[in-house]
Amino acid sequence: MLNQDKIKKTAQNYFEKIRAVRQHIHANPELSFKEYKTSEFIQKHLKEAGISFTGGHVETGIIALIKGNNPDKKTLLLRADMDALPIQEKNEVSYKSLYPGIMHACGHDVHSACALGAALILNDLKEEWEGTVKIMFQPGEEVLPGGANLMIKGGVLENPKVDQAIALHVFPSMEAGKVGFKSGMYMASTDELYITVNGKGGHAAMPSEYINPLIIASEILLEINKRFTNSVSLKEMGGENIPTVVAFGKIEGKGATNVIPDKVEIAGTFRTMNEIWREKVHGELHKIIKTISEKYKIESSLRIEQGYPFLVNDEVLTKASISVAQNYLGKKNVEELPLRMTAEDFAFITQKVPSCFFRLGTANKNKGITSGVHTATFDIDEKALEVGMGLMAALAVNVLNSSATK
């Protein structure tokens, strides 16, 4: 049985290499579904290590395979995402983004580096574990329809068939050296909401000749807010105790001080953790908009861009992973996490195979590394890389060397 000390030592040996990998990816960010150079860079490292892989999945995605002893026993998927965000980096570091307006502000550079590091560790130690590891470097986690979704449709979970899956994500509110887990339901589904309210424009001084879509849009927003933030209302609709967020962040009516516009456009998000309730809320939103529009004798529309499903961590796999993490890092460095209403496209994978999605602490308050993801000053304490790649490898070995088979 492969012991954790050997994995830790191998992770230490690869730390400088993986830090350089992370810094290169960070300095050369690419937006969703445009990760061509990132993909080539990762493929180069896989090739140098003698790890079998195929590229070109959803154009930039990579699938690598490492076979241990008895490779048909079980297949575990390790997943990493590669895309960056349209943010102008404000950090003054040697590896600052070289591309104006593009930045690895969500840690996908870290995810890719950790997955590559885990692959190198597992490849070096493949004589000491059983089964097969499949490493997925995916494009486009940040935008719909999600790179994981497209890679699943392209067959990433087949040939060989994936039995379980593991992924990590940076967690800037947790100190580097720590990790967090949440068994069962963890992250929300997400849908994008687009409402168009068609009124009748005109001169603001002549109210009898126009139908102001701004007033109607306001009434729609207030009614939606009342319905989905009120516990009594949620109970009446059958959504009591189901985490629910319906929020709007954009409203646009291109009028002026004395010009009433013809239409107003609104954009928002809907998050929840129950698929039956999710569908019901879609219907309720349509009903609210229809009722208010009929009241004013105008036409409005609601377009729902259905996004990622909720993310659920398999309870058996997560419990076993927590135990491995406690042994690897010490119990004080493994925390239980609360539910989150944020979303993640690894959720598509958790809906297909038993999975564990855990959080990797990246903060260092003493060094001032505390900025959240999706901010222009996000960065990490790089010792998190050693923790991330080592723990991913340890979790993989635990799954593959367990007595359970396909």
Image (cartoon, grey):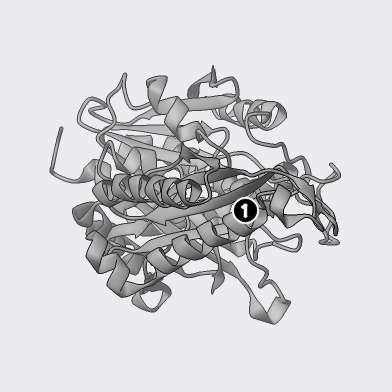
Q: Position of residue 147 (x, y in %)?
A: 51, 32
Residue at figure coordinates x 65%, y 49% from the top left: 211
Q: Position of residue 402 (x, y in %)?
A: 19, 46
Q: Position of residue 30 (x, y in %)?
A: 72, 36
Drawn side of residue 257 relative to residue 301, left or right: right
Frontmost residue, 114 versus 57 = 57
Instruction: Return the residue at label 1.
Output: 106
The image quarter in which residue 82 lies: top right
Total numbered circles:
1
Q: Is residue 2 visible?
A: no
Against 215, is 85 above or below? above
Frontmost residue, 9 versus 392 = 392
> Which element is circle 1 on?
loop
Residue at figure coordinates x 64%, y 35% from the top left: 32
Drawn side of residue 294 relative to residue 209, left or right: left
Frontmost residue, 107 versus 287 = 287
Quadrant of the image containing the C terminus: top left
Residue ranking furthest to the front: 208
Specify few, some or many for label 1: CA neighbours under 10 Å numbering under 14, 14-19, or 20 or more.
Answer: many
The image quarter in which residue 391 lies: bottom left
Residue at figure coordinates x 37%, y 72% from the top left: 230
Frontmost residue, 335 versus 33 = 33
Q: Amino acid at mark 1?
A: Cys
Drawn side of residue 244 relative to residue 54, left or right: left
Residue at figure coordinates x 85%, y 59% from the top left: 257
